[in-house]
Image (spheres, grey):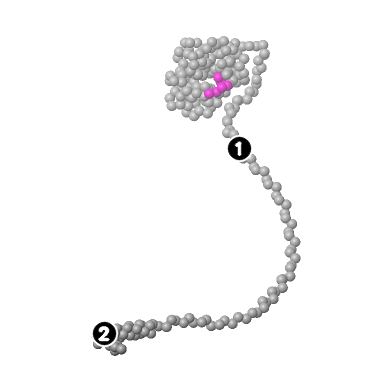
Amino acid sequence: MAEARRPSSGTRRRLTTGALSVLGHLGVLAALLAAQPAPPRFAEPAPILVQLVAPPTPPAPPALTPAPDPKPTPPAKTPEPPKKPTKPPPPRHVARRTPARAHAVPIPAGDKRGPSGDSLVSDAELAGASTAGGGGGGGGECNMTRRLQAALRKDRLVQAAAAEAHQGQGLGGKAIRVWNGDWVRHGEQDGNGLAAVREAIMWEVGFAPAACRAERVHGLVLISLNDAPGAARLVVGSGDWRWSDLLRRRGPAAQE
């Protein structure tokens, strides 16, 4: 039998080197594994002693005390009815005060008087009469003619009395004289000077300023009750006079 072939020296060297290399790697790996720290250990909690105890006996409930008797409820008050709002007092209107008649002279029912001569005014007399807008008649700062005319135009009683005098006495649009130093009576009118006209004139003149009442007037003053054609017109005045003279009643007229 032939002898077994021995490996050559080069082969042995390579094997030896490979074996040493493997051993070296294993040693390094073992060293790395040995160098790693051991995994931490979890601390176990200390044991807790548990003891079962019976619950305490609850206290007895407090004794119930009787509630006091409730006080009687007072009867409910009846609500008062709402108060009605009080209305302000109506404005006071100062009424004209008519002088009391001391002696009234009755007029028989069948005695119907027509227009007297004193109540008619001729065209010649009216030509020189002063008016509210034409000067005269105590014009100036007072202008009593304008003041008086404005007041009479607003008075319904004056308008009615003048219209009745024109229609009832057949004056045909002529001017009516109501004062010529004294109040003039007209037909069946109550009192001299057409009672409603007389009272309105005396009221307005009486409350005029003292300086206006004392103004001197010459001749007649014509007062128109409206601006329409054929409107009723009134005439006062005679000669030389003052407006305050209309407040005095003389002669037979003072008895009306």
Mark 1 or mark 2: which comes first in sequence? 2
- Kind of residue sitting beneath label 2: Thr
Residue interval drawn in magenta: 154-159
- The part of the image, by quadrant, that contains residue 25 is bottom left
- Kind of residue sitting beneath label 1: Lys
Tell me the quarter of the image containing the N terminus. Answer: bottom left
> Along the line of sight, which residue is nearer the eye, 223 or 231?
231
User: Measured from the top left, where is residue 107 in percent x and y?
Assistant: 65, 15
**Left of 105 or right of it: where is 27?**
left
Residue indicated by mark 2: 11
> Along the line of sight, which residue is nearer the eye, 136 or 31?
31
Label pair 1/2, CB-CB below 8 angstroms: no
Q: Residue at x 70, y 47 (%)?
A: 78
Residue 253 showing in the rendered view:
no
Q: Residue at x 62, y 39 (%)?
A: 86
Residue indicated by mark 1: 87
**Left of 129 or right of it: where is 118?**
right
